[in-house]
Image (tube, helix red, strand yellow):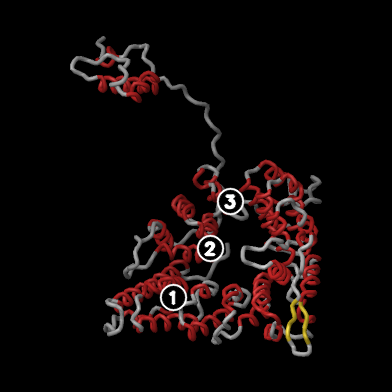
Amino acid sequence: MATTAADTTTPTATTWDDLVAAALLGTGRRTPPVAPRPGQDAASALLDAAAVQTVRRRAGLLPAVARRRPAPAPEDRRPPLPPAARARLAMLLADRAGPAGGSRRGTAPDLTELLPQWLTAANQYGYRAPAALLPALLDTARGRTDLRPEALALAGPRALWLARLNPQWKFALRSSPAGDWTPAALAAPTGDGDEARGYGEAAERTWQEGLFAERVALLTALRRHDPAAARTLLATTWSTERAEDRLMFLDSLREGLSAGDEPFLEEALADRSRNVRATSAELLSGLPDSALAARMAHRARSCLSLDFGDPRIAVEAPHECDGAMQRDGIVAKPPSGRGERSWWLGQLVEAAPLSAWNGRFGGRSAAEIVALPVADGWRPDLHAAWCRAAARQGNAEWSRALLGPAASPPAADEASWRDPAKLLSALPHGERAAWVAAFISVHGLSEAFRLLGVCAVPWSEPLGRAVVDALDIARDAGSYPWSFSGVMGLAERCLDPEQADRLEVLTAQPDESENGSPGAAGYWSEAFQRLVGTLRLRAAMRRELAPDHGPRCP
């Protein structure tokens, strides 16, 4: 039998490691462990020998022990997407990289900004994601944290199944708040003695042995199913958890916070972690009838009084921050440039229930209290603390009083403490939109971006009209549209799609203004064409998801 040249030049004693070493060092520094054929250089002989050795290694490979086959993917009984909506999702996912950067975007809608709205609408109809698009959907959600809740809701239980098989999708185990824990899976089996604690053996095993993401998912799901059982489960390992984990677990109590959580949170006030103590105090201050809220109210009332001679608020800020105050979440050391007494006062007033002030100031309403003069220049500190309290407690009456009329310009000292966006969050959606519309009509768009961000989508007709009118005024003033790119982007996502036809007139290119910026009219025409095109695309997406029927429930 004839032998090949490679066989004659590769000694049987040559090992794979010898060949790798020669290749790494180079044939100029180390003589290869093979003899070249006539007319062949050393490097070629080395590569030939490596090729032969590779075939030998593969041919002689022993079969590995077969791994256990993964469990089948869970069934998802939700209805499939209509064909047109499925095609639309594939298009949106294919364009997830988004348009190239630059100030001029042209007239084409930005599909990356439409994907969040499409996912929200699809979830409202209770559809499931097509199996073939799940990898692309998970890849998109991996790169965009803003998409994860809606993307994972559409992907359903199969997203968690895939995440356990692909490390790149592990985020789904952390981002899916309830995981795959259904009420039936959480319930304790009858007769096993677990009814007293409210969760079964599977939940106990996951809590003791699971990954951190799985434990968070379990605790969140159990919190929704049985809040008391969630606290019981958390208490079993609380003292042995890391500080950062205790903080994350504690945050799960925000949802459905109730008086039943007070004993646990009171114990957490003595935690060895300052962040855990601060979060516990914040949660307790959100319970108006808690013992901590009563203690804070007592301290704060002792600092404020009503001067009846000339009705005004007199302030006597704390002179010290004792241990009891620090245990209740008051931070003793102020930030740089902030006085100690004003720092302590602000924290006390912020944590006190707002209901404590009506009686303290002679039965006055929130609006009447806010209108009272404040002695000795304490007004900014006091009103700033009331603003934080109103936002934290979601108190619409106080938020309304602190906001004041939208058309009125803020006082000179209000810019340092008033945050309209946070105060608006406590108001009903309709009132929010009306206030922001009135603000824009008077003050324009320069300070409206954050305010628009807290308004419900789609915007109400008066709010949408106020935004479009303000953009039209900016165009007539001759400025460039990218000075308002943030508001224009919000309009594309938040205007009612039914307004597209009414806005068509804005797409025409007007004559250049004598005092305007060069080319601004053309850029504005492009911007309005993109706005109208985006609104029409959103309307088409809505029809594709629900062509002939109303919303379905999951």
Front label number (2 vs 3): 3
Q: Percent from the top left, x then y, of residue 226?
A: 73, 57
Amino acid type for the residue under numbered disc 3: Arg
Q: Which is nearer the eye, 519 or 121?
A: 519
- Near mark 2 (Cα within 10 A), the count class, few <14, some 14-19 or many ≥20, is many
The residue that mark 2 highlights is 123
Nearer to me, 529 or 153: 529
Residue at image location 75% in from the left, 60% down from the top: 326
Report the residue that reaches farthest toward the bottom: 309
User: Which residue lies under the disc numbered 1?
Assistant: 497
In screen coordinates, is 228 left or right of 210?
right
SS for callout 3: helix
Left or right position of 232 against 337 = right
Residue 59: x and y, percent? 39, 21
For disc 1, the neighbor class at 10 Å (few under 14, some 14 to 19, many from 20) is many
In the rendered structure, find residue 174 and report the number of the disc placed on it.
3
Give the mark toward the camera: 1 or 2.
1
